[in-house]
Amino acid sequence: MQRQDFGKLIDALHQEGYTIIGPVLSETAISYGEIQSEMDLPIGWTDIQEAGKYQIKRRPDEALFGYNVGFQSMKKYLFPPRQRLLTVDKKAGRLTFVEENPQIQKYAFLGVRSCDLHAALIQDKIFSEGKSRDKAYVRRREEAFVIVVQCGQSSSCCFCLSMGTGPKAEGGFDLALTECIDQQQHFFLIEIGSSRGEKLISSLPLRDVKEEDLLFAARVIENAKTQMTKVMDTAGIKELFYNNWEHSRWDDVASRCIACSTCTLVCPTCFCWTIEDSVSLNEQKAERWRRWDFCYSMEFSHLPSGSVRSSIKSRYRQWLSHKLASWIDQFGMSGCVGCGRCITWCPVGIDITEEVAALRVQSKEGVSQ
């Protein structure tokens, strides 16, 4: 698909009744927002990411998707930060309980990266199976139309190669785009991942793929791989954490961590929540809400006798050990997709790949535990 025809893809999604969620440019960041036209996309903009640092800047070209992952992911829309679950009405001394049946928007997610697609697959396992099954989540997920954009670059915080989650998405999408741009041409190679995707693009002006198009797209993805410098060694990682529960490295990272919960907010797989009940002033109505919660808060592990994890050390250890170790026991997979958001957006620049590496090296060297 040629660049000048990209707007027709957006029009086709609108005609199918989708609310399009994709990258938009604010004054300070590229993040998800509603897309009405191609002009809402961050055309010609990119971002620079390092530990504790994020900056947007102009690109030398007019790429539509020439940036790394923003601080948001599909999680915000599939698993809303706050959602009403139940309403209770009191009339004539009788209580009526009404379970919330939220209206589900048809979302089309444009510009999803491979790491975030894997994150959604992880959340599918959490919210679509067993006792945690969330009917509203399942409906949102079934309605969602996912358009992946294959990564053509990597930030200094990306490590999806280590986690086996990118930079190229291999499946689980409706359409996958590879943006190919140089001084002579600008086009999108389209891969069809579902019958819905095939139907959507059937009316678009497309040309047959040539061998040189495939080679161009392969170079784009290879560029993302070669730019990726951050690595996490995942060999025996579950045992690494379980065998070093009292390692001195936890004190080191606790001296830097401020327990702000930013890493859990930006993480595309974190799923902890709490329940809040509220009662009207006239005591005739009550509501139950679910909202995101964070294992860094003192209240998260609060019992009648007090908080189980009262120190920052214990709360950071809980988060990282769950993400990289006990998550595997629970769900048969890691809770990390290597997107690097927790590194970029940590106010003090804590890097989980460095923490894992330090824990591994110091353990081998026999540092006191």
Image (cartoon, helix red, strand yellow):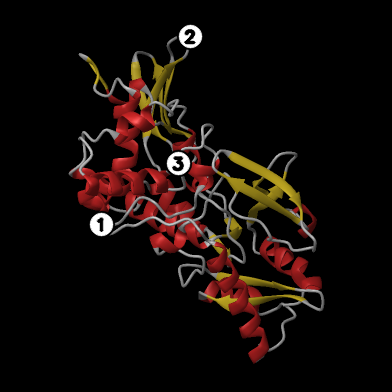
Residue at 46% across, 38% down: 350
3D distance between C-alphas at marks 2 and 3: 25 Å
Q: Residues within 10 Å of mark 1 (few under 14, many from 20)?
A: few
N-term-proximal mark, 1 vs 2: 2
- Left or right: residue 304 versus residue 152 is left
Residue at 65% across, 64% down: 16
- Left or right: residue 352 versus residue 216 is left
Q: Residues within 10 Å of mark 2 (few under 14, many from 20)?
A: few
- Left or right: residue 356 versus residue 197 is left
Question: Residue 217, percent across and down?
Answer: 62, 78
What amino acid type is highlighted by mark number 3?
Answer: Asn
Residue tagged by mark 3? Answer: 101
What amino acid type is highlighted by mark number 1?
Answer: Gly
What amino acid type is highlighted by mark number 2?
Answer: Leu
Residue at 81% across, 74% down: 183
User: Residue furthest toward the left?
Assistant: 243
Closer to the observer: label 1 or label 2?
A: 1
Question: Residue 7, percent across and down?
Answer: 77, 66
Residue at 51% across, 55% down: 158
For the residue labelled by badge 1, is the local secondary structure a helix, a strand or a loop? Answer: loop
Q: Which mark is residue 281?
A: 2
